[in-house]
Image (spheres, rainbow, N blue to C red):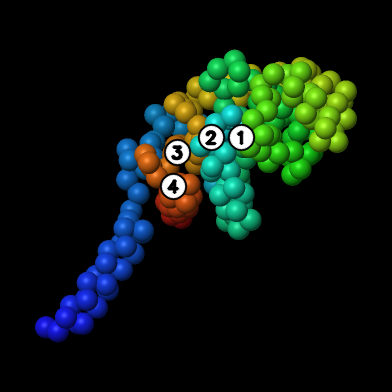
Amino acid sequence: MSKLIAIVIVVIGTGLFGMTSAHAEIVEGRDYKVLENQQPVRSDDRIEVIEFFWYGCQYCNSLHPHIKEWLKNKPSDVDFRYVPAIFRDNWIPGAKAFYTIETLDIMETIHDKIYDAIHQDKINLTDESVLFGWVEKQGVDKEKFVNIYNSFTIQNQVARSNQMTRQYQLTGVPALVIEGKYVTSGRQGGTPQLTIRILDEIIDMVRKSKE
């Protein structure tokens, strides 16, 4: 066997191994877990995906642009939504801020900026006085924001987030919950791209189970 042929075989073999690894089947216990008690979903006609997050989480911040990109071509049979997780009291301002900007219908302009303010500009938005001042600088009506932020409706939504964090047996964020049953945070030491691939694989698995 010539040296050139040997090199070609090695290169092809390496490529095939890479392809096999890239499309290896996901494994329960490594890539995702199954909830003991499946949670209700909003629609039986669509596959529900929830991203539990916290604005202050560096891993949520790293995953966020990949989720945004994924949403641009999200499968039509998938229903996606964000839910702020609550593990500690200092996560509550972020959850209240999220539901407030959602109520004000300014998610498109403010959601990303909150991540940037915390992780790039190092602004402590868990301090409500800082948060309110920062929101005003973004061109948002401060008084209106504060009134909604402190409303009974937002308190109820935060209480629901708190409850869901426990019902879905979350141990950290980011966490993607598919169809109220499968939970993934990607793979230990994996990349955001791998997390998205695992998400797609689980969605496909759920889709096939519905056929």
SS for dot 4: loop
The tally of labels here is 4
Spatial separation of the CA atoms under disc 2 and disc 4:
13 Å
The amino acid marked with disc number 1 is: His
Q: Nearer the viewer, mark 1 or mark 3?
A: 1
Find residue 58 and name its label. Answer: 2
Mark 4 surroundings: few (<14), some (14-19) or many (≥20) residues within 10 A: some
Label located before the other in sequence (3 or 2): 2
Q: Is 60 placed above or below 65 here?
A: above
Does residue 51 appear left or right of residue 26 in this picture?
Answer: right
Outermost residue toward the bottom in this view: 2
Find residue 191 and name its label. Answer: 4
Spatial separation of the CA atoms under disc 4 and disc 3:
10 Å
Residue matched to label 1? 119
Find residue 185 and name its label. Answer: 3
x, y percentage for residue 48? 56, 43
Give me the residue at 86% from left, 36% from top: 139
Question: Does the image show residue 197?
Answer: yes
Residue 1, quarter of picture: bottom left
Q: Nearer the viewer, mark 4 or mark 1?
A: 1
Do residues under tags 3 and 2 come within 8 Å of each other at their CB atoms? no
Mark 2 surroundings: few (<14), some (14-19) or many (≥20) residues within 10 A: some
The amino acid marked with disc number 4 is: Thr
SS for dot 3: loop
